[in-house]
Image: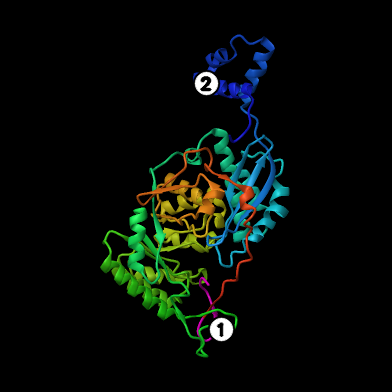
Amino acid sequence: MARDNSNSELFHRRALLKAATLGGGAAVAHLFAGAGTAEAAEQESMSGRGMPSPKIKDLKFIEVGVPDYPECAIIKVITDQPGLYGYGCATLTRPGGRSKLVGGMVDDYLKPMVLGRPADRIDFIWQLAWMSSYYKNDNIQNAAIGGLTDALWDIKGRLANMPVYQLAGGKQRDAAEYYLHTGGKDLIGGVQKQMAETGCRNYLMSLGPQIGATNTAFGQPKFDDGVIAYDQDKATRATLADFELFRKSLPPELGLMIDVHSALDPVRATQYAKDCEQFKMVYVEDLLTAKDESHYKVIRALTSTPLSIGEVWNNPAEWQPLVEQQLIDYIRCHVSHIGGFSAARKVAALADAYAVRFAWHASPNSPVGHMTNLTLDLTQSNFGIHEHVPYPKIIQDIFKGHLETKNGFAWVSEKPGWGMEIDEALASKYPLKLEHPNEVRTPDGAIRDGDG
């Protein structure tokens, strides 16, 4: 149960709901028939006020650093009503996400600000937390705000005894088609195995450092600090060869994507988008960094390859012009990076006005964050595709009630709130580790953008 109730309180709540369906004097007469005059007056007054709002009693930062699974973080909001609490995802992308800093933001800044405030005023608390800082739109602050307010959505769903998707207007679709990550030496065999096991029809490859690994200027496989050298041209040649094999060997209806991780300079990125056109991609993701965003206008003019951006762009000043000028096809923010469920609904609505779809980033993410993404997928009209990362057993043991996948589609929980419970004792055995810094270097030793 989400909260403890006495039998009389449960009866009173059910009676209020029943009375609300009758309306006016008939409702009051039905509800309070046989009650004493003083008691009836008090109960009539209560029926006009509604149930008392729960207050925020405490915030807790939950770390989950399970080996061989992306690290994730959760904010738990505990209310003053026994057994009533909620969870929200505050996970940052890695490497270089600085996830442990979110805990300091929660404990030192958010908690003193929100304790004692009504837990049902979600948008008010979002604005309070966001406006409280003179400097805005950094990923750490946004993740903390998103985790806090997403936990309040969970609480509201538990109070209403409804999944959050019902509070957001209900489903526009029954389930969300998803994609899986693939690659490696046995590309075709790997995809065939995934298809047989999951029914998934969409696959994403990565233009990661290992694909472009080369010798340093000194002829060594690594630099002194252990980082490999990255050759942009080697990486693009390798993935284009993989695309050709993919299209030649697998059914034509399979969707194909590539995550570039902002690892190409503008000239190479433009040529790469043109080269990808022949393979009929679902999209090419994160071709460029935020500082190079003006080049999307050039790329859009030269190719019809669908484009997506967003996983490391948390400031609207970065991505909003691309949406409004229709220079991209998918907005792909990491939901906690932009401030959680409330903020993502606004982003989706803005994108919808310009015929841009969304495909929220989800690796790394917690199962709570995946459920948040899926709720957005099902309730917003301009959904594109869902990113899914299968859960190892230890994650399934920690996060109870995670989303289900079947025949290439993801299905949302029908339980109240996000529909999830966390084994906090088990999670406490897996704290976040100090992640290695993001580092990508060219063969001559220079540092450049990309996913290290």
Foreground residue, 442 or 318?
Answer: 442
In the picture of the structure, the residue carrying the numbered disc 1 is 223
Which residue shows up at 49% across the image and 53% down it?
347
Of the image marks 2 and 1, the number of the one nearer the N terminus? 2
User: How many numbered discs?
Assistant: 2
Q: Secondary structure at mark 2?
A: helix
Q: Is residue 100 magenta?
A: no
Residues at marks 2 and 1, CA–CA distance in whole angstroms: 71 Å
In the picture, the disc for residue 18 is: 2
Which stretch appears magenta? 442-452
Crowd class of label 1 (few under 14; some 14 to 19; many from 20; radius 10 Å): some
Residue 60, x across and y down, in percent: 67, 49
Residue 292, x across and y down, in percent: 49, 72
Residue 69, x across and y down, in percent: 53, 60
Type of the residue with mark 2: Lys
Q: Is residue 34 visible?
A: yes
Type of the residue with mark 1: Phe
